[in-house]
Amino acid sequence: MSRRWIERGFTVFAFAAAGILMAVTMVLTGYLVMKGWNSLGLELVFGTTRPMDALCLRRPVLDGLFPAVAGTFALVALSVSIALPLGIGTGIFMSEFASGALKRMFSLFYDILAGSPSIVVGLFGFSISIFLHRYVSGQLYPCLLISALSLAFLVLPYLIRSTQTALENLPPEVRLTALALGASPVQNLFYVLIPRSLPGILSGVVLSIGRCAEDTAVIMLTGVAASAGLPRSVFGNYEALPFHIYTVSSQYMDSAELATGYGASILLFGVTSSLFLFSFIIKNIATARTAVSGPGL
Amino acid sequence: MSRMEKIRIDDLSFAYGKRTILNRVEARFMENTITAITGPSGQGKSSFLMVLNRLWETIPGAHVTGRVNIRFDGEFRDIHHRSMPLTRLRRTVGMVFQTPNPLPMSVAGNVAFPLKLAGTGKRKNTEERVEKALSRVHLWDEVKDRLKDDARKLSGGQQQRLCMARALVFEPEILLLDEPASSLDAKAAAGIEDLMLELKNTCTLIVVSHSMDQVRRTADRVLTLESGELHGCESS
């Protein structure tokens, strides 16, 4: 086969791969919307409770998805808050301070963590909660905090690797600029390296948010419940959209109930999209601020 | 006019990994002169400059032996001695790189950046020093109305002069220039050469250059770095 045909074949394959991916996404989204559209509405979220009463926490929502939406937001916020400093700090360590055998050993650990199935991480979180219940306080059970900690460990590799890669990919002249002007390594890190790496670091944050919002295996073992209501404390049970979708799809009694599962899927899309949008806005603001202002005048 | 020695290099060797870049180099640099370092690519000219402000320490696996003494306040001091503060060394020995590398911040922010790092200067004092540094590189008139603009919007020649202003804001005694005009057009390059000749009155300049025309026009002395050895001659 001539080289020209091989090149042409490869180009067609690349176009086809991108096209198939786009088509699958569209079919998936279209199918969900088609199935769940009729169940969408305020009633799906708030049930028979008036929306203002629910939003102002005056009356509980017993037959809607509002507690699951709030639980998902709380879970994502708590998980990312725990994972963010740890992940970015470790990424900085890997890029700027670790070297030789130590770096290779840490890399191996992070790769093992990245490859761990979420059910295993969930089981680990469940074991932790049993340990805490037995040896720390009999009041401690699987709860929002244990779920958030487990999810934080699940997404740590994304944050570590995105931070490490963003820092390591900076051109040498950028690394040397501030040092040549008398900056200490830590000043160089905070004034130049981290601001220049922010877009890459925040890409890892976006990925982590998506992973925290969609994971079901971890939360099933660590504190989610079908009808816990709104999350009241980090030590209590909570509801979450992915778990609701899982229970409805595995235990539905009629097609109307299944339709609420599709509706919940669309809501979960909405929740993750709004979280993505929020982090993209932060990313763009951070990039713009780094681009023109910086320290000085 | 008799000039005093500014830098003394004795038995200096520099290597990274198993590759020797500088092999027992001996050299003297007089104050208020321009010394050009020439030689084939890949012989370690940039690394030589990085030894003089200890930026070589950022290169993984690099090591240096020998002595580099620089005269500070009338007294020679070994730059690798632990009593030599690195920040003071790098403020006294400024460096400008081959490619203009303004930081992603405003024009004024770039020039004020070393002051910010040092935590020195009130706002008014900072503004004065920024103006002075920009004036020294003949950039003030061109950018005085654009101080808050992104520095990366300046032309290549302006960016390189901005980087020189940034290196000059602490009024260094030695300025290391690594092919400062190689990425610029002829007019901008000529502007940099004029600037080098002006800066010679207050600084000792060591310039890596591949352009023999530039070397002839600017340098008092030419050193050639090849196979780890530095050979020198006075410029014509």
Image (cartoon, rainbow, N blue to C red):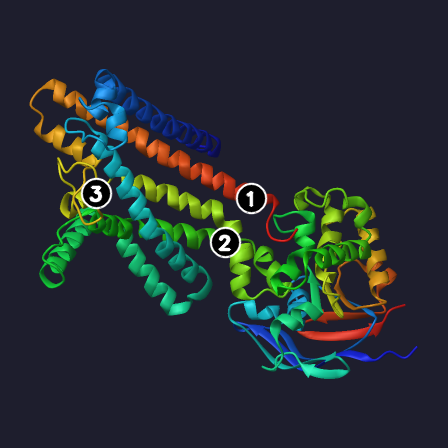
Name the subunit of mark 2.
Answer: A
| Amino acid on which disc 3 is placed | Arg
Viewer-proximal residue, B76 or A107? B76
Viewer-proximal residue, B36 or A233? A233
Q: Earlier in the sequence, mark 3 or mark 2?
A: 2
Camera sees residue A292: yes
Name the subunit of mark 3.
Answer: A
State whether discs 2 and 1 lie on one chain: yes
Q: Quadrant of the C terminus of chain B?
A: bottom right
Instruction: Tell me which residue sits at (59%, 69%) in the image.
Output: B56
Which residue is labeled 2 in the image? Answer: A194
Q: Is label 3 in contact with label 2 (beta carbons under 8 Å)?
A: no
- Residue B10 lies, in percent from the top left, at 69, 83
- Residue A247 lies, in percent from the top left, at 12, 33
Where, by quadrant of the figure, is residue A211 drawn? top left
Which residue is labeled 3 in the image? Answer: A232
Question: Mark 3 or mark 2: which is in front?
Answer: 3
Q: Earlier in the sequence, mark 3 or mark 1?
A: 3
Instruction: Tell me which residue sits at (80%, 55%) in the image.
Output: B137
| Amino acid on which disc 2 is placed | Ile
Q: Is label 3 in contact with label 1 (beta carbons under 8 Å)?
A: no
- Residue sitting at the far right: B1
| Amino acid on which disc 1 is placed | Arg
Question: Mark 3 or mark 1: which is in front?
Answer: 3
- Residue sitting at the far left: A253
Q: Secondary structure at mark 3?
A: loop
Viewer-proximal residue, B123 or A15? B123
Q: Secondary structure at mark 1?
A: helix
